[in-house]
Every structure is written in C-alpha cells, then in structure tokens.
Amino acid sequence: EVQLQASGGGLVQAGGSLRLSCVVSGFSFDDGAIGWFRQAPGKDREGVACIRPYDGITYYADSVKGRFTISSDNAKNTVYLQMNSLKPEDTAGYHCVTECLQYDSLVVHTLTAYWGQGTEVTVSS
C-alpha cells in the first residue's frame, strides 16, 4: 500500500520561507516520480513541482520557478519542498503525489497516482 505523509506547513508572512517534507512508503524511488500539488479553496488543483529521485530531474510550475526547490533523500524515502519568497497566492493545501510528470510545461500526474494527506500553508500579506 502506498502512503504519503506530508508535514511542515504553517502560517508565514509574505516573503518568508517554509520547508515541507513528505515521507513515502510502498513506492519505489528507483523508477518513480514524486511531486507536490496544491489546492486553494475555490481554485483548481495545481502541480507545483516534480522530481525523479533516481536521476534528479525536476520540473516546476511557472508560478514557483526561482522560489521553490524540490529535492529528495532517497535513503529516507523523503521528498522536500523548500519554499522561499512566499506570496499570499501560495496559500493552499499542499499534497505530495506519486507518478508526476511534465506535460506542455505543466506539472501533472497520471490517473493512477496516489495522493497523500495535505499540509496547510497560509501566507499572510
């Protein structure tokens, strides 16, 4: 059974930073990709970042490029999202998701992807 447990969310002022963590079990880092997706109330889900832990290739949404960094610690089966220069529009529930990829410059996931329980990020202005 695939399980993804996200943590690290919180309340931060605009311009601040947060680091999210996602511990993954039941999913191989040797041939699969893990990503972060977010959803704010009343808005569509958005793929934020994706990493292929086996070769380090990363993809980012245009809205976060230069501010967010996704990384992985393969020995710990953990994926991180370092978020800097946060903006109020980054406020959302952040979820780690398996089987992400880049498509037409967007970060998306397959139909068989697993979603973990989210962690809330609130950025005040």
Image (cartoon, grey):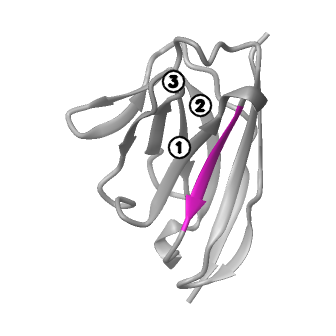
Residue behind mark 2: 97
Residue behind mark 3: 33
Disc 2 residue type (three-letter): Val
- Name which residue lies at 20% across and 34% down: 104
Q: Do the residues labelled 3 and 1 touch (CB within 8 Å)?
A: no
Is residue 47 rendered to the left or right of residue 122?
Answer: left
Mark with earlier residue (2, 3): 3
Disc 3 residue type (three-letter): Ala
Q: Is the magenta stretch mostly helix, strand or loop?
A: strand
- Name which residue lies at 66% across and 72% down: 122
Q: Distance between the residues labelled 3 and 1?
A: 13 Å
Q: Give the range drawn in magenta.
A: 78-83
Q: Nearer the viewer, residue 37 or 68?
A: 68
- Name which residue lies at 51% across and 57% down: 42
Q: Which mark is residue 37?
A: 1
Q: Which residue of the protein is positioned furthest toward the bottom in this rendering?
A: 125
